[in-house]
Structure formats: structure tokens, C-alpha cells
Amino acid sequence: METIRDMEPPPHIIGIKHFVDYKTVDEILKSKNFRQGSHQESQPFFGDSLLTIDHGEHFERRRLEAPLFRKEALEYYEREELLPLISSSLEECEQNRGADGLVRADLCLLVRNMLARISAVTTGIDGVDTPERTDAFRTYVEQLGTGATVEWSTEDHGEVIERILAIRQGFVEEFYGPSVERRCELIDQFRAGQISEDDLPRDLLTLMYLHWNEDWDDELPLREATLYTVASSQTTTHAVPHMMMHLHEWFEVHPEDYEKRFDREFLKRAGHEAIRLHLPSPALLRIALEDVTLSNGIEIAEGERVACLFTPANRDTSVFGDDAKSFDPYREVPDVKPWGFAFGGGEHTCIGRTLVTGLSARTDGDEGTDGTLVNIALALFGAGIELDPEEMPAFTELSYHDAYGRFPVILRDL
Ligand code: HEM
């Protein structure tokens, strides 16, 4: 199958100016003359969240949330949360052992479960611990993701918003409400001197309630939590199957590299290539704050919405070389980030990037982090992952996303 595709631009950007080369996309994303242009319709889900505010207000919010991604916090998540969660998700696959003695799984579902739990921990949602609760939480996050990307929907947009708002009520009652209540009680105990700050959970909701801003409306933490759960899970869940497919193909052509499946540096590079080639959405949209003339002479009027097509920009041969449209874990791109615009650019650059790619400071097992991609890939190779010869992976047909919908695997060493 063709694993690196040319994706058609989605219908809702047809008719608006779009940019496909690295230099122009970089210029627009970094420019102070533009503001966020995505999520115009999905305000009930993402309104006033970090992703949709700009400039001064954005800077303040980003500063508030930055501690979640400090070195100590990342080390804590990786060692105390991520690694045990990956192991327990794999152990649960044991239930699928067939009559032939082999454990079969759908990699998409497996990774979605792993990521649901990790995103619950960083956001501050309790009780995503058993397979049933993980399933329930994951389903809510997927539905909230549909609401948050309603502008891409092929259904009636008003109906989608109404339906997902009703579903969100269930999420609030089952997960969000009790989690907030527990955090507020802990914060009260901290303020009363009964517990120390170190005893508070390290997550988004605790941070927001601890540093409450009177300008916020009561539902803002819910929308911010929605952003975090959706942004952290639906991106990485798409990236891992791409990464594993590319590695499978790479090892077929380069069998001498197969032993590197446990080499963290090699896997890190493979992860960068996979996310460079497969972006989490079709386009990043921006709105001009004033009349702008780009350095290539193109004029954009005040209020005009433009689309940065970051998939072609990430395959720009002038930046990534003549073979930019292929997967090469040995690629050297000294002047730009190896993942290109996979995490966006400018002020809205992904805040969770280091969770995914790890801290580059890592020198040995005790310092720094490797990130979710490397850790999940290592665990999957440890479990003896192989494609299931009975059914090949297939891309999703449900959206314009460049993502697998099914990815059957055998976990031979479980
Ligand atoms: C492979 C994984 C990921 C990819 C490819 C990815 C990609 C992106 C991109 C492209 C943006 C910019 C959107 C824009 O400019 O309109 C973004 C923003 C964001 N991402 Fe990620 N992301 C990933 C993982 C995560 C994780 C793990 C988290 C959470 C902990 C996260 C949280 C966010 C948030 C909160 C923003 C908004 C940042 C801001 O507006 O300042 N993402 N991400």
C-alpha cells in the first residue's frame, strides 16, 4: 500500500488563499500580523482556550501552563505515569490471546487507550484506570474532538454542536465534575496549611484552580481541559501507527537496521520523520489583523483568512532534500526542526511537544526524557509487534485526516 499520500485539501479551505512552501508558512505562523483562524465555529468547546486566544492574553496563559512541561514535570510523567500506563495497556491485550496462542490487537485502539490515560493524567481527570473507564473516557474525548473540529464536519454543523454539547454533559457528570471537586478540596487543604504544594496533583486543572483569574468564566477550565485531552490524544494516536508502518517498511529494505528497534536515538529520529510526513490536521488557519504584504509579494487583506498547508510545506524539497517525500530516519536537516511544522509554529507552537519528542538533554537512563513516541515504540517492539498477515492496515475514511483507521498487529512476545 502507499503509505505516504498526497492529501486533497479539505473543502472548507477551497476558495481561500493557501500556502504550501516552507518559507511562506513559516513567515505567516511567526508573524504578529495574524491571529488564530481555526476553531471559529467550535467556540462552545475550545472558546477562549489557549489555542484560540492571541498575543498578550495568550502569553499570560501560556506562562501559567508552562510548569506542566518543565523538565521535572516531564520526568515525573514519563517515569511515574507513562511507562506504567504503557505496560498495563499492553498487559490488557493478553485477554485477546487466540486459540493459536497469539495475542492480536488493533494498534489504533491500543494506542488510543494508552493516550487516553496519559492525557487524563496531564489534564487532571481522575478515574481513567480500568479498561471500562478508559473506554468511556476515550469515547468522550473522541466525541469532544468531533465538536472541537466541527468546521471539518460533513454533517450539519449546528446539529453536531448540539449533539456534542449534550454528550459533554455526561463527561462533566462522570469525569470532569468529580475531578474538579477533588482538586478544589486539595487546594483548600493546601491553603489551610494541611498539605504541601508537592502533595497537589501536577496537572492542568489543579494549576488553573490554584491560580484562578477573575477574568475567566466558570466554564473556561472545562474548555481548556477539552483542548488538552483532544490535543494530546488525537495527535499522538495518529502518529504512532504511521511510525510503526514506516519502520516496518524500513526494516524490510534495511534488515541490517532491525536490531536498532531498541535504539532510542534511532527511534527518536524515526518518530520525527513520521510526524514530519503525517500532520495532525489538513491545515493551520490564520486571520490577518491588518493588510499584509508577504515577502513573496502576495497581499492579504485585513480580516482575510488564509490556510497554511503544512503537509506540502513539510515535504518542501528545498528544505528537506530531493527525497523529502520519503521516510529516512538518517535524514539531516541542520537548519530547521526535524519535524518541520508538525507542532505548528510561532506563538501557538504545540505546548505539549516535549511530552511527545522527549527532552533532547537525555544522555542516559536517569536524565531527561524520551517522550511518548519512543517509549510506546520501544514497548511495542518489546512485545514483539508484527503486522498481522491476515489483514493489512487501512486508512480512515471518516475524515480528511491522514490517519489509519485500522492497524491489526500480532504481539508475538506477550
Ligand atoms: C504527535 C503529537 C502532537 C502533534 C503533532 C501536535 C500538534 C500541534 C499543532 C500543529 C499545534 C498548533 C495548532 C495551531 O497553530 O493552530 C498544537 C498546539 C497545541 N497542542 Fe499539540 N500536538 C501534539 C501533542 C500534544 C500533546 C501531548 C499535548 C498536551 C499535553 C498538546 C497540547 C497542545 C496545546 C494545548 C496546543 C495549543 C498551544 C497554543 O495555542 O499555544 N499537543 N499541537
Image (cartoon, rainbow, N blue to C red):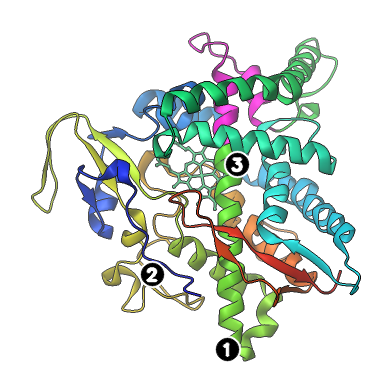
Q: Earlier in the sequence, mark 3 or mark 2?
A: 3
Label located before the other in sequence (1 or 3): 3
What percent of the width, then of the height, locates residue 40? 36, 28
Image point (32%, 34%), residue name = 37
Q: Which residue corresponds to mark 3?
A: 69
Q: Horizontal placement of 270 versus 391: left or right?
A: left
> In the image, is 157 to the left or to the right of 378?
left
Question: Would you say 138 lies left or right of 411 here?
Answer: left
Rendered location of residue 280, percent (x, y):
47, 51
Residue 222 badge: none
Is ligand 1 closer than 8 angstroms to the Cβ of mark 3? Answer: yes
Identify the amino acid type marked 1.
His
* Magenta residues, start to end: 203-228
- Dot 3: what SS? helix
Q: Is residue 115 magenta?
A: no
Which residue in the protein does label 2 denote?
Answer: 334
Amino acid type of the residue that numbered disc 2 sits on in the rendered structure = Pro
**Residue 265 x/y as whole percent:** 61, 71
Within-10-Å neighbours for mark 2: few <14, some 14–19, many 20+: few
Residue found 74% across the figure and 25% down from its top: 175
Mark 3: which amino acid?
A: Phe
C-alpha distance separating marks 1 and 3 = 36 Å
In the rendered view, would you say 267 is above or below 278? below
